[in-house]
């Protein structure tokens, strides 16, 4: 199943709706999740407006989601870590699987290069889904086009019993066009090299170096004289030395070093073709280093109590070349309040941030059927996503912390009670959490994020708080399997600026864009026989907050619109039912190929879930319109076979 869709079934994990990339964990924004593939960060985790995960689930071995109690070996994000590790290739024989549907096709092949020593695995996916836009009622979307493809490769080499090397690569590309006008493209590119060495059975290490590249561009050639391409890029390189030591049977120590290098191109605006009169413009690149040292000790205190205590020493160095404007602290940042200019040469450090990150968790086993857990973690985030969340394009801008933009700092407390019921056939859990975040980023009204050289003038410093309750009841085994997950959560933010221009809603608390108080997820899986199975997933959630125009004024020939307080209103609730039927072919082991069919129905209820609301001035009358991305049932059938 799709990785992102699967974790959205977990209490505490939400999405703002269809047409959105990423996910939100415990009141955090999408950029506060560290998504790792082969140990490298993925900067855009979706294909096709969030309909597909950017990671191919056919090759996945392990997926671990940390919502709280994040180990000290992870850093750089506030809310969660999603660690995705694809599997190694088969060392003994050639095998594979493939599938085709009206929307996508995929193939995986794997096998030995040298039996029991060197193996490979290759996987690819692509789509031909333009027909699906014909099902959308919105005229602009009806004439749109979209496509994607991705590719994974991994070679594993067992040098001897104490040494192992892995070389992995991932590439993906998306392209879509709205209403035959503007074209959006983005790509992820990851390469990772990892060496594992066993000094002894109690002490071993993993050394890795990887590079993650993310690029998007927006282009239009409808008018030749105005043809342009707008580009944004982020390139990060990571070196990690991770050590594990088992000094005794009741003690495990993990320690190491984590070094990240970032280079961000905030914006490049160029003409396309000889006829274009667009003037080229480039915003200066940002460069930074983020080194960290970490240590964590997991020890068993008694047969009932185990404790994890960790510390991560995080630091950050921003480097030139860079030109920095200094503003008069008595006034809000603007052109007129500039009092000085600082110029820094190549590799000159112009800003440093540092601080400890404490990680602590404890697990108390009450009896054979129940346990209680509590955890606390502090995290720092030096990379910020400047985003308009109602946009369904990938035109989000990553920005590094700098002279004016401080790193986000978060503290989370969480506790949970877990119990096995009905002779250990049913899992039950209840978790609560509370989170405080400083140095969040928001924007003044009417801010233009594209090619904004002095974006610090439009940023508003915020603080946030989030709290919630997560309930889960789950039957994971047997012919009939089901789960019921419910989340109550609130995410509130407020501006902390000293000037009126930097205060949103008069400095009062208000809901964040991704605040959705109620979230209910029901899943059902029924194994009718060895060959036939049925599944159903239902999701209900509160609508997200929005800002509406409440009045308009006419001054001469100009109509001015007055808006409500930020996020005062909400979209209608979200409701969706998905159904699927899996039919396996002949299960005899001697057959060369083993086929199976999957029949699915997305949004079986046909509900037009509102993604966003937009407004137009029609003859001096402001009219509102609701946008629904997939407002009707979408059937699909896929044929898959293993060989």
Image (cartoon, rainbow, N blue to C red):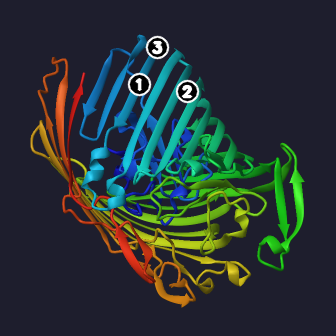
Q: Is residue 591 left or right of residue 284?
A: left
Sequence-earlier tag: 3 or 2:
3
Residue 69: x percent and y percent? Answer: 53, 56
Contact? badges 3 and 1 (CB < 8 Å): no
Q: Is residue 149 shown above or below 458? A: above
How packed mark 3 is, by other alpha carbons closer than 10 Å (few <14, some 14-19, many 20 or more), is: some
Q: Residues within 10 Å of mark 2 (few under 14, many from 20)?
A: few
- Give me the residue at 53% from left, 89% from top: 554
| Residue matched to label 1 | 122
Residue under label 2, please give it.
201
Left or right: 580 as drawn, with respect to 204: left
Q: Secondary structure at mark 2?
A: loop
In the image, 183 versus 428, the foreground residue is: 183
Q: CA distance from mark 3 to mark 2?
A: 21 Å
Q: Where, by quadrant of the figure, is residue 41 drawn?
A: top right
Q: x%, y% of residue 252?
A: 57, 41
Query: For the residues carrying marks 3 and 2, which lies nearer the camera in this image?
Result: 3
Quadrant location of the C terminus in the rendered image? top left
Q: Count the numbered circles shown.
A: 3
Query: Can residue 219 be seen by looking at this rendering?
Result: yes
SS for callout 3: loop
- Measured as percent of width and height from the top left, residue 176 is found at 43, 47
Q: Quadrant of residue 590?
A: top left
Give the x, y percent position of residue 613. 40, 72
The numbered mark at residue 117 is: 3
Q: Nearer the viewer, mark 1 or mark 2?
A: 1
Q: Nearer the viewer, mark 3 or mark 1?
A: 1
Position above or below: 306 against 608: above
Q: Residues within 10 Å of mark 1 (few under 14, many from 20)?
A: some
Between 366 and 126, the residue placed more toward the observer is: 126
Q: CA distance from mark 3 to mark 1?
A: 17 Å
Q: Earlier in the sequence, mark 3 or mark 1?
A: 3
């Amino acid at each position: 199943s799709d990785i992102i869709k699967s974790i959205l079934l977990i209490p505490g994990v939400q999405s703002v709706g269809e047409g959105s990339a990423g996910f939100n964990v415990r009141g955090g924004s999408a950029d506060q999740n560290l998504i790792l593939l082969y140990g490298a960060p993925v900067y855009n985790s979706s294909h096709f407006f969030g309909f597909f995960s950017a990671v191919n689930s056919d090759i996945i071995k392990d997926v671990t989601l940390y919502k709280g109690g994040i180990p000290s070996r992870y850093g750089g994000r506030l809310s969660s870590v999603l660690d995705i590790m694809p599997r190694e290739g088969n060392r003994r024989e050639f095998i594979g699987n493939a599938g085709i549907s009206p929307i996508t096709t995929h193939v995986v092949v794997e096998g030995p290069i040298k039996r029991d020593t060197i193996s490979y695995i290759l996987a690819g996916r692509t789509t031909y889904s333009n027909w699906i836009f014909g099902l959308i009622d919105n005229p602009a979307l009806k004439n749109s086009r979209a496509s994607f493809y991705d590719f994974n490769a991994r070679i594993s080499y067992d040098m001897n019993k104490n040494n192992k090397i892995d070389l992995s690569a991932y590439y993906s590309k998306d392209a879509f066009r709205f209403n035959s006008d503007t074209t959006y493209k983005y790509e992820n590119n990851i390469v990772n090299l990892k060496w594992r060495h066993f000094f002894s059975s109690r002490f071993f290490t993993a050394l890795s170096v990887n590079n993650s590249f993310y690029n998007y561009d927006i282009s239009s050639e409808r008018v030749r004289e105005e043809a342009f391409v707008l580009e944004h890029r982020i390139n990060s390189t990571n070196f990690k030395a991770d050590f594990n030591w088992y000094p005794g049977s009741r003690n495990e120590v993990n320690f190491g070093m984590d070094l990240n290098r970032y280079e961000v191109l905030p914006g490049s605006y160029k003409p396309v073709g000889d006829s274009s009169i667009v003037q080229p413009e480039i915003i200066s690149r940002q460069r930074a280093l983020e080194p960290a040292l970490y240590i964590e000790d997991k020890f068993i205190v008694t047969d009932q109590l185990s404790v994890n205590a960790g510390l991560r020493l995080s630091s950050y160095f921003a480097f030139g070349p860079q030109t920095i404007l200094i503003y008069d602290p008595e006034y809000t940042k603007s052109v007129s309040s500039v009092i000085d200019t600082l110029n820094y040469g190549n590799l000159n450090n112009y800003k440093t941030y540092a601080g400890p990150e404490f990680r602590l968790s404890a697990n108390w086993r009450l009896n054979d059927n129940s346990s209680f857990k509590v955890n606390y973690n502090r995290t720092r985030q030096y990379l910020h996503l400047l985003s308009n969340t109602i946009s369904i394009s990938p035109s989000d801008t990553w920005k590094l912390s700098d002279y004016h933009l401080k790193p986000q700092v978060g503290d989370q407390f969480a506790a949970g009670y877990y119990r096995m019921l009905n002779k250990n056939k049913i899992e039950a859990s209840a978790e609560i959490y509370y989170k405080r975040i400083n140095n969040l980023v928001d924007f003044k009204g009417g801010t233009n994020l594209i090619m904004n050289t002095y974006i610090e003038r439009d940023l508003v410093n915020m603080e946030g708080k989030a709290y919630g309750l997560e309930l889960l009841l789950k039957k994971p085994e047997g012919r009939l399997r089901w789960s019921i997950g419910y989340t109550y959560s609130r995410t509130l933010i407020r501006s902390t600026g000293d000037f009126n221009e930097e205060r949103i809603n008069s400095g009062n608390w208000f809901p964040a864009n991704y605040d959705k108080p109620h979230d209910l997820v029901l899943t059902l899986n029924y194994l009718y026989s060895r060959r036939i199975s049925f599944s159903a997933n239902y999701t209900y959630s509160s609508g997200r907050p929005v800002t509406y125009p409440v009045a308009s004024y006419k001054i001469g020939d100009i109509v001015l619109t007055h808006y409500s307080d930020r996020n005062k209103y909400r979209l209608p609730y979200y409701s969706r039912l998905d159904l699927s039927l899996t039919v396996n072919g002949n299960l005899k082991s001697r057959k060369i190929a083993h086929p199976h069919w999957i029949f699915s129905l997305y949004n079986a209820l046909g509900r037009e879930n509102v993604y966003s609301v937009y407004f137009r001035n029609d003859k001096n009358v402001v009219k509102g319109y609701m946008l629904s991305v997939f407002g009707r049932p979408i059937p699909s059938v896929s044929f898959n076979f293993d060989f």
